[in-house]
Image (cartoon, rainbow, N blue to C red):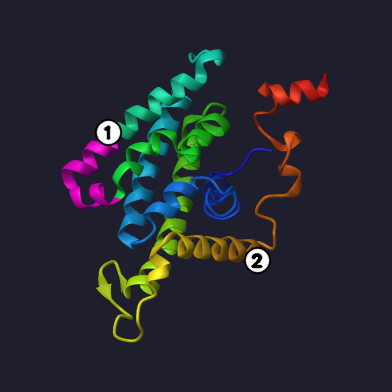
Amino acid sequence: MKRSKLSIFMAGIVRENPVLVWVLGCCPAMAVSTMAVNGVGMGLATTFVMTGSSIVIAILKGIIPEKIRIPCFIVIIAAFTTIVQQIVKAFAPAIDQALGIFLPLIVVNCIVFSRAELFAYKNRVADSAIDAIGMGAGFTLALVVMSSIREILGSGTWFGIKLTADLFDPMTLMMLAPGGFFVFGVMIAAMNYLTKGRGVKRKSFGCKGCPSAEGCGHMNRKEA
């Protein structure tokens, strides 16, 4: 059944949120979510790369050979990652320094590659662009909420503005890995509660629910 443009966009924010539902991109999400501004920067950079690469892949899908599609995806994603890295270095050096190695590592971000493989390579240009923007918005929203909670509780500030620093002593734990895992877990539980567990249906897990099942050696061995 053909999906509307709105449903494609909204899927990435709620029902198929890449961080809180699919649990992808956890490494950069945990690493840069200590400050809200870092979450915004990482989210926008990833959205730019994902949108640009999805559009190009959707345009070229008819001429990209099936057997070498993955190397082609990597080259396209790497090109957009290089572009966004140079832009951030030039116009936002503070964010570039804060994001560190995780900015160039967008090239291997599971969220970006999954949308290229599962959506852009199989759909039209407009739908691919909308899907990428929706997924990017969902990723950015999750990062901003996570980093805001950690920054407010861990530093008493939000986007550098003092909020609770004079009300209670900041909890340094929130700026460390354990605090990040705690906030991440609470956010996943909250998303599961709000969607009543319908974010991803149980049948979506396993070989039968995998969009790449046809090309998977494990699936072929099971059928054999």
Quadrant in the rendering for residue 223? top right
List x then y, in percent, for residue 64: 49, 15
Q: Is 169 displayed left or right of 13 in the figure?
A: left
Q: Residue at x 37, y 72 (%)?
A: 152
Verify CB contact (< 8 Å) between mark 1 and mark 2.
no
Q: Residue furthest bottom?
A: 167
Element type at mark 1: helix
Residue receiving disc 1: 83
Q: Residue at x 29, y 85 (%)?
A: 166
Q: Is residue 94 magenta?
A: yes
Q: Residue furthest right?
A: 224
Callout 2: 10 Å neighbours few (<14), some, many (20+)?
few
Quadrant in the rendering for residue 211? top right
Q: Residue at x 55, y 33 (%)?
A: 119
- N-terminal-most mark, 1 or 2: 1
- Viewer-side residue, 138 vs 32: 32
Element type at mark 2: helix
The N terminus lies in quadrant: top right
Q: Is 96 displayed left or right of 173 in the figure?
A: left
Numbered range of the magenta stretch: 83-98
Q: Amino acid at mark 1?
A: Ile
Q: Amino acid at mark 2?
A: Tyr
List x then y, in percent, for residue 59: 45, 23
List x then y, in percent, for residue 113: 49, 33
Helix, strand or loop: magenta stretch: helix
List x then y, in percent, for residue 60: 45, 20
Residue receiving disc 2: 193
For residue 149, above or below residue 85: below
Q: Is residue 62 visible?
A: no
